[in-house]
Image (cartoon, grey):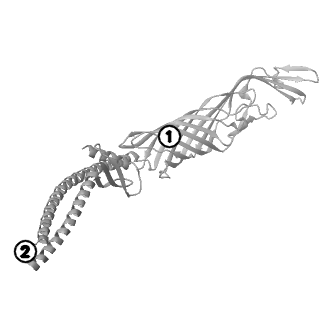
């Protein structure tokens, strides 16, 4: 039994090496010091034991061959003696009692006795050899039975692996929604950025994996995006040196703004296109990363809504006088900022770069739906548009939003469902 365990351990150790099918040999020693040799075929999936060989078998076989050689040699001498005896008997008669004949008969008797002893020894050794060979064959069969069990285990594991991987290579249809914070890009001096929210939703189709060795696929779909931009300013002063009143007189316009805010909403029709690294399993959670671009078409932009107040004074250097709160000349105190009309010119087309990191979580092995959740990061590659005061003579380029193209950074949290098509 100890020998069998040793054989199994040695065979299992050898079986861990994957190679092309070839006959290999492993040698070792049993606890009682005997040499043991196992020959087996190594394969990519299974190992087949060809033979189990003990040193004791070699020793017995060697002894049997030696005794058989001795018996053959003695038999040769016996045959020669018998031949000579026959010749002498034919020449001198069977009753001849010559000394040579007596010696030959004694020698033949001794040879016959030796041959009998040798045959008895050979029979005993052959019995031992048959017994050991039978034990070897039993252990060989035990090894083969053990390997058969191992092969069945491998098949079962392969079935389980196939079950686990079900859905990995399948096309999918996905639905996702996201909510995030909009970080406005650079704005004009005297204005400060406020953080607002953005919403996204999309439906997409994902291909099966493009590579057998790496889970990568392509996703494409359509979606909707809505973002808001907000900026504010506590107070600032703006001067326009060469202004003209309705009477044609030149003066320096002095604007003083207080507690200003601006807000703007933009809506887009999205066409997301992405590479997905990692795909959903039906039986376990998995991670994924997506890298893509999203062409967007502007389908709606609100007017910039401004709130706050301003004062407008006029300094006439010709008379060195400052006029204020004269409505006839347009000088006012506590004027309403929204009365200064702001014009918005959004770009009709934009292109967003995006990165997504998340996880797939299966709902059930029997349901082809997988939940996905993760973080998404969007940044517009192209400018979103521009905004300016409609009366370009008054405060040119001093509205707060959509300055320098209005680029925004939007991190968002997304959640969705993935339906596997197979």
- The residue positioned farthest toward the right in the image shown: 318
> Is residue 381 toward the left or the right of residue 246 in the image?
left
Mark 2, Cα crowd under 10 Å, few <14 / some 14-19 / many 20+, is few
Mark 1, Cα crowd under 10 Å, few <14 / some 14-19 / many 20+, is some
Q: Position of residue 335 (x, y in %)?
A: 75, 23
Q: Which residue is mark 1?
A: 176
> Is residue 20 toward the left or the right of residue 34 in the image?
right
Frontmost of labels 1 and 2 is 2
Q: Is residue 334 above or below residue 390?
A: above
Q: Who's the residue at 27% across and 45% down the image? A: 3
- The residue positioned farthest toward the front in the image shown: 99
Disc 1 vs disc 2: Cβ atoms closer than 8 Å? no
> Is residue 335 toward the left or the right of residue 140 in the image?
right
Residue 298 visible within the image: no
Q: Secondary structure at mark 1?
A: strand
Q: Position of residue 93 (x, y in %)?
A: 7, 77
Q: Nearer the viewer, residue 232 or 24?
A: 24
Q: Nearer the viewer, residue 314 or 284?
A: 284
In the image, which disc is placed on residue 96?
A: 2
Q: Secondary structure at mark 2?
A: loop
The Cα atoms of the two marked residues, 1 and 2, are separated by: 121 Å
Q: Position of residue 26 (x, y in %)?
A: 36, 51
Q: Who's the residue at 57% across and 33% down the image? A: 180
Of the image marks 1 and 2, the number of the one nearer the N terminus: 2
Q: Who's the residue at 17% across and 57% down the image? A: 121
Q: Position of residue 29 (x, y in %)?
A: 32, 46
């Amino acid at each position: 039994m100890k020998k069998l365990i040793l054989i199994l351990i040695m065979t299992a150790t050898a079986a861990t090496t994957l190679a092309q099918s070839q006959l290999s040999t492993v040698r070792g020693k049993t606890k009682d010091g005997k040499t043991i040799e196992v020959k087996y075929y190594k394969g990519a999936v299974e190992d087949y034991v060809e033979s189990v060989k003990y040193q004791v078998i070699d020793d017995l076989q060697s002894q049997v061959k030696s005794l058989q050689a001795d018996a053959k040699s003695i038999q040769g001498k016996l045959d020669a003696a018998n031949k000579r005896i026959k010749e002498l008997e034919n020449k001198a008669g069977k009753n001849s009692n010559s000394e040579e004949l007596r010696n030959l008969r004694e020698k033949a008797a001794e040879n016959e006795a030796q041959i009998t002893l040798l045959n008895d020894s050979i029979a005993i050794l052959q019995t031992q050899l048959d017994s050991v060979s039978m034990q070897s064959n039993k252990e060989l069969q035990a090894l083969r039975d053990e390997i058969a069990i191992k092969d069945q285990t491998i098949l079962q594991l392969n079935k389980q692996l196939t079950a686990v991987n079900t859905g990995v290579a399948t096309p999918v249809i996905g639905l996702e929604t996201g909510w995030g914070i909009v970080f406005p890009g650079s704005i004009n001096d005297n204005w400060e950025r406020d953080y607002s929210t953005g919403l996204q939703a999309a439906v997409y189709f994902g291909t099966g994996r493009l590579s057998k060795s790496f889970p990568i696929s392509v996703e494409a779909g359509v979606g909707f995006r809505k973002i808001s931009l907000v900026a504010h300013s506590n107070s600032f002063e703006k001067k326009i040196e060469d202004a003209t009143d309705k009477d044609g007189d030149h003066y320096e316009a002095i604007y003083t703004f207080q507690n200003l805010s601006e807000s703007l909403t933009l809506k887009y029709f999205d066409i997301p296109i992405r590479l997905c690294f990692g795909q959903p399993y039906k039986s376990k959670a998995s991670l994924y990363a997506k890298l893509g671009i999203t062409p967007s078409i502007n389908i709606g932009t609100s007017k910039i809504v401004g709130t706050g107040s301003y004062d407008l004074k006029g300094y006439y250097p010709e008379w060195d006088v400052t006029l204020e709160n004269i409505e006839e000349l347009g000088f006012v105190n506590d004027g309403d900022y929204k009365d200064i009309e702001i014009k918005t010119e959004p770009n009709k087309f934009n292109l967003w770069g995006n990165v997504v990191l998340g996880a797939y979580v299966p709902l059930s092995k029997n349901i082809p739906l997988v939940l996905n959740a993760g973080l998404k990061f969007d940044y517009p590659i192209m400018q979103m548009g521009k905004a300016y005061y409609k009366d370009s003579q008054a405060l040119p380029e001093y509205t707060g939003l959509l300055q320098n193209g209005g680029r925004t950074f939007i991190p968002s949290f997304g959640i969705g469902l993935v339906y596997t098509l197979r």
